[in-house]
Image (cartoon, helix red, strand yellow):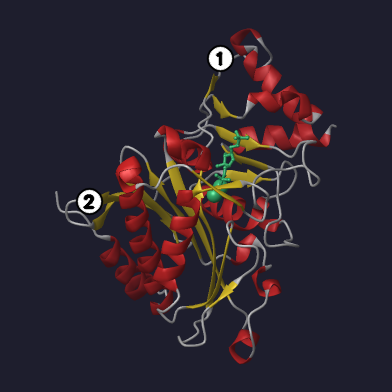
Amino acid sequence: MKRTTLTRFLIEQQRNENVLPAELRLLIETVARACKTISHAIGRGALGEVLGSLDSENVQGEVQKKLDVIANEFILDANEWGGHLAAMASEEMETIYPTPNRYPKGEYLMLFDPIDGSSNIDVDLSVGTIFSVLKASDAVAGRDVTEEDFLQDGRNQVAAGYAIYGPQTLLVLTVGTGVYEFTLDKEVGAWLMTDANMTMPQGKCEFAINMSNRRQWSPGITRYIDERVQGAAGPCGKDYNMRWTASMVADVHRILKRGGVFMYPADNRSENKAKLRLMYEANPMAFLIEQAGGAATNGFIPIMDVEPVGLHQRVGVVLGDKAEVATITEYGKLN
Ligand code: AHG
Ligand code: MN
Ligand code: MN
């Protein structure tokens, strides 16, 4: 079977749909190339001496894995010289990384989570890379980029996607014209389209949540889960299944392919009561899920309408099946 390559897909989006400026195409190709390198490093595992933790912590106070730092470097190195970016920001860096002066400065801003699901690296479970692309405001052309330039709401994203390093390495992407999946042909080194115009199935009875946080949930989330756990005998009248991989990328990918709902709700543990980060986890996933016909909220309003106030801001996340997300939102309002 002759498959469309990522390169061809992007060129056709640029040519036919007129949605993809050349610089953005270059940016996506560069990210995809960096993800190939990350996939290779992950695949080598202990043989490549990339497993395990470092002594360092990132800005969120989390212990950094070797691969968090390696993947962060891969993405910075691949993208800093191409002339398509004004600056980058990542989970692993306290503040922004402006394009060095020795390289031309582009008009885009990229935020990324170099390795999502780090706790799974050392036990050979799926991890991923998440990215979100924004346009820098015109003002940036004549001055230095600042953190504030990144604080745009999710609706401003011009591209978003993730790579998942699982049994296969996949790239799932949107530029606002639907969701497309590419599988890495590791022998040839090419990304080949394996799913197009992805639409997430609705009405599937599967939820993903870390149940160990139950005591910290809001009454709305507790009610939603308790009703589902009661199965066919409970108020839903249906048996539900539960899955939790502890890699948002893997959970979201499953939901895109076979439906269900994913939750990492705000709770009482941390100061701002949530775990996942708005700018490089929640927003890009919300863009993909909405493009695939699902919904993504913080439990109350669409994630992409949440006003960002900080690069590393955390946010509650409820995404996937439209009707289930609506039910959770409704239960939340009754609190
Ligand atoms: P990261 O590895 O980038 O810090 O993200 C991990 C996130 C997310 O991928 C996952 O859904 C969640 O943390 C898992 O959290 P728990 O360990 O609390 O289940
Ligand atoms: Mn993450
Ligand atoms: Mn991470």
Which residue, given by chain and number where applicable, does mark 1 sit on? 239
Element marked by disc 1: loop
In front of the other: label 2 or label 1?
A: 2
Quarter location, residue 122: top left
Amino acid at the residue labelled 1: Asp
Find residue 271 and report its horizontal and vertical position in percent.
Answer: 81, 45
Q: Would you place residue 16 above or below residue 323 in this image?
A: below
Query: How many numbered marks appear?
Result: 2
Q: Give the camera-side residue of 299 and 64.
A: 64
Tag 2: Cα neighbours inside 10 Å, few (<14), some, or many (≥20)? some
Amino acid at the residue labelled 2: Asp
Q: Residue at x 73, y 37 (%)?
A: 329
Q: Give the camera-side residue of 39 and 220.
A: 39
Q: Quadrant of the C terminus?
A: top right
- Left/right placement of residue 175 relative to residue 39 reads right
Find residue 189 and report its horizontal and vertical position in percent.
Answer: 22, 57
Find residue 150 and report its horizontal and vertical position in percent.
Answer: 64, 70
Find residue 246 and report its horizontal and vertical position in percent.
Answer: 54, 35
Earlier-in-chain disc, 2 versus 1: 2
Is any atom of residue 269 visible in this view?
yes
Q: Residue at x 39, y 69 (%)?
A: 78
Tag 1: Cα neighbours inside 10 Å, few (<14), some, or many (≥20)? some
Element marked by disc 2: strand
Which residue, given by chain and number where applicable, does mark 2 sit on? 185
Q: Give the camera-side residue of 225 and 149.
A: 149
Q: Would you place residue 114 above or below residue 148 in this image?
A: above
Q: State the residue lying farthest toward the right.
A: 335
